[in-house]
Image: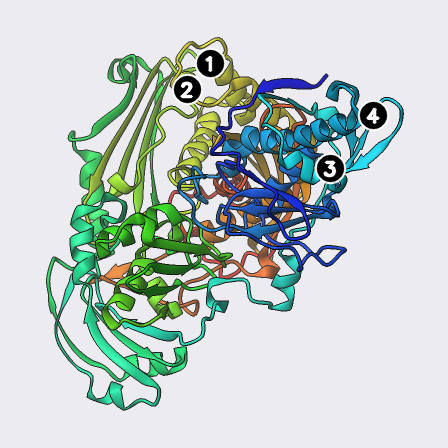
Amino acid sequence: MSTNIPNTFSRRDFLRTSALAGGGMLIGFNLITACKEKAEMPVDIASLNFNDFNAFIKIADNGYVTIYSPNPEIGQGVKTSMPMIIAEELDVPWDHVNVEQGKLDTENFQRQVAGGSQSIRFGWDALRQTGATTRQMLVNAAAARWGVEASTCSTKQGVITNAKGETLGYGDVVKEAAALEVPEGVTLKEPKDYTIIGHDAVNVDIEKIVTGKPLFGLDYKKEGMLYAAILRPPSFGKKLVSFDDTEAKKVDGVTDVVRFGEKAIALRSANAWVAGMLGQSDKIAVVATSTWQAMKGRDALKAVWEDGSPMESTEGHDDELIKILDGSNLNTLRKDGDVKKAFAKADATLERTYESPFLPHACMEPMNFFADVTADKVHLVGPIQTPAGTAQSVAGMLGRDPKDIHLEMTRMGGGFGRRLYGDFAIEAAELSAKINKPVKMVCTREDDIGIGVYRPGIKYRIKAGVKDGKVTSYHLKEACINSNMYGLIPHFFPAGAIENYQVDAGNYKSNITTGAWRAPYTHFLAFAEQAFFDELAEMMEIDPVQLRLDLLQNVKGHKDENIQYEPKRMEDVINLAVEKSGYRNKKDGVFQGFCAYYCHNTHVAEVADVVIENDKPVVKKVTVAVDCGIVVNPTGAKNQIEGGVIDGIGHAMYGDLSFSNGTPNAQNYDKYRLIRMKEAPEVETHFVENELSPTGLGEPALPPAVAAIAIAINQATGKRLYKQPFANKLEVKELIG
C-alpha cells in the first residue's frame, strides 16, 4: 500500500519555472542534506539552459532529469545514493538522471554538512517528498490534458498512463506541470515497489576519478589565479618574531610575500565555530604563479620564532591524563544507582586502563582552498565538509554580509572530520583580501600532518563488579586532551543494562589543536569497552556473546529516553554475525574475536578471524552484520563498511602521532604508518533486512572492527591489548591479510 503524507514544503522551498530554453520544468526543493554529481547521460543535454538555482529538479522536454545536490561529497557516496531516493519517487529510469553539484545556499537548504553519517538519515523523508511531489504535478498535468481524474492515472519509468491505456511521457507535459499548483499531499511508494532504491548503482563520479578528470579541490583553476604556500609556526606554542624574505623574492614566479593572520586572531575569539582551529595565526604566505614556485619561495624564507604558550610533549600529556583518572575532579555524565556500594558488595571486580595516541587525519588530498575577495563578493571554491559554517566564519572575519559569500564545493579526497574545520578556507580568504588577488592556498603533506587538527590522546579506565554471577556495577572514566572538543557517549551500551552504572569525564587543556576524527567519540571507546567485556566474560567464565545478550535483556522495556540503542536490533545483528561467521563452529587454527556496537544510529556486530603465520597474528577476514534500516545503494553501502573496517584496523595497528616540544614526530607517510593494500583482510558484509528508515554508514563499521581484531589477537596469542597502536605491543611490522 502506498503512503499518503502531507507536503511539508513551502512555496519558497518548492520553486517552479518553465523558463528553460526549449521548454522544461525546473523545481527547487529543500533537500536538507545531499545528492550526487554528474553521471554520463545517454543523450546530449548540454544545450539546456542551466539557470542560477542551487537546489532543484530540472526536467527537460525530452524527459531527462537533472538533480542538483547541495551537500559535500567526501567519498561516502551520497552523491549517488541521495539522487537515487529522488529518482525512485519521481519514477524515472536511473539512466535518465543527471546530477550536478550545487553551491552553498543557506536560504533553500538545511544541514549542508558532510559529517556524523547523517546525510541519508536526515534527507530520507525530504528527498522522497521532493520526488513524489514532482511526480504528482506531472500526473496532474497529464490528467488535465486528458480530462480525467489524476487518481485514475499511474506512472512507470517516466511515462504516465490513464485508465484507457493512453500514455504521455514526462517531457510531453512538463510545461503544463510547471504552471500548476504544488500539491498539498503526496503519495509515497512502498518499499516493495522500489526499482532503484535497494539496487546496486555505480558511483556517479567513478569515470572522472579513474581517468583523472578535474573533480577535486586541487584540480580547480581560474584564469589569473595565483598559488600560495604558507610558513606556519614550526611548533604549537611558537610565535613569529621576524623574517627575511630576500631570497624568497628572488625565486622565479614569486609575486608576493606577506605576513598575515591578524584577522584570524580576532575571529578565533569571536566565533566558537573556529575556536582552537586557528591557533597558528601568525603566518607568512609566499604567493607565486605556480604551486611549485610558491613552495620553493617558502623554503627560502628565513624566520625567527620565540616561545609563546608552553610547548607540550606526549610524555607530559600521559602524566596529566593519569592524574585525571586518579583524581576526583571529574564531571559525571550519567549515574544510575551507587557503583561504590555495589563494588563493596561484589564477589569479584575487574579494572583496566586503555590508552590511545593522537592521530592525524592523513587525507589523501592535502588541505587546499581557492578565494577571490573583491568589493562585490567573496568567491570561495574547494573541498569542505561544512560550507555554511565556513562561509559564516569568512564573513565574520572580513566584516562582510554573509550574502556576499559565494561558496562552491568540490569533491574531497578524504575528510574524516578534518575538513569540518574551515581554517584552510579562512586562510585563503584572508590572504586574498590582503593581496587583492585570486589565490589558492595549497598545503604540502608536511603542512597537513605537521600543523593540523588531530584526534586527541585519550585514556579510559573501566571497572566492573560481579555479584552472584551477574554484572552489578560498571564505572567508566575518561581523561582526554581537550575533551570539550571530544567527550564520551554516556547513553550507549551498556547504559540501562547494569543497575549501578556511572560515566565520568575529565580533560587536560592543550594548545595542540584537536577535533573530530572518523567516528568521533566511538572509534576508541568501542575498543576499550568491548575488549573489557571480553575480558570480563573470561573472568566470569561465560561466553562473551552470551554476556552481551544477557545484558540486553535488562534493557528491553526500559523507559529511559536517553538510551539511544535498541536492544532488539542489537540482538539481531549479534545473531546474524554469529551465524554468518561460524562463530559457534570454530575452525582449527582460526581464532575469532567478537564485538557488537551501536553508533551513528546504526547497530553493527563484527567477528574477526585471525591466524598465526610465521609466529605472528594475521587478520584474514572480518564478518560484519549491519542494521542500518533500508539500504539505498548496496554497492555503496558495502564500500563504506569495508572501508571503515580496514581504516579502523589500520589505525589501531599502526596509527601513532607523538609530540616533542610542540612538534609532531611524524609529518609524512615515511614515519606515519598507514595500512597497506596487501594487509587489508577480506570483509564480508550482511545486512539485517527491514523497512525502517535508513541510518548512518560512513562511520559505524570502524569502531567495532578495532575491538574484534584485538579480541581475536588475544585468542591467538594470549596477549591482552590495552594500548594503541597494537603493532608496538605485538612487535610486528606487518599484519598481512
Q: Secondary structure at mark 3?
A: helix
Mark 4, other Cα within 10 Å: few <14 / some 14–19 / many ≥20: many
Q: Quadrant of the N terminus?
A: top right
Q: Amino acid at mark 4?
A: Asn
Dots 1, 2 in contact, CB < 8 A: yes
Residue 645 higher or lower than 529, as above or below: below
The mark that comes first in sequence, 3 or 4, is 4
Which residue is at a point 31% across and 77% down the rendered structure image? 287
Question: Pointer 4: what residue?
Answer: 162
Query: In whole angstroms, how far apart are the C-alphas of marks 4 and 2?
Result: 50 Å
Q: Nearer the viewer, mark 4 or mark 2?
A: 4
Q: Secondary structure at mark 2?
A: loop
Q: Nearer the viewer, mark 3 or mark 4?
A: 3
Name the disc covering residue 563, or none. Answer: 2
Report the front residue among 491 and 592.
491
Q: Nearer the viewer, mark 2 or mark 3?
A: 3
Question: Pointer 3: what residue?
Answer: 173
The mark that comes first in sequence, 4 or 2, is 4
The mark that comes first in sequence, 1 or 3, is 3
The mark that comes first in sequence, 1 or 2, is 1
Q: Amino acid at mark 2?
A: Ile
Q: Amino acid at mark 1?
A: Val
The mark that comes first in sequence, 4 or 1, is 4
Report the front residue among 564 and 179.
179
Residue 590 in view of the camera: no
Which residue is at a point 21% across and 75% down the rendered structure image? 258
Question: Pointer 1: what residue?
Answer: 555
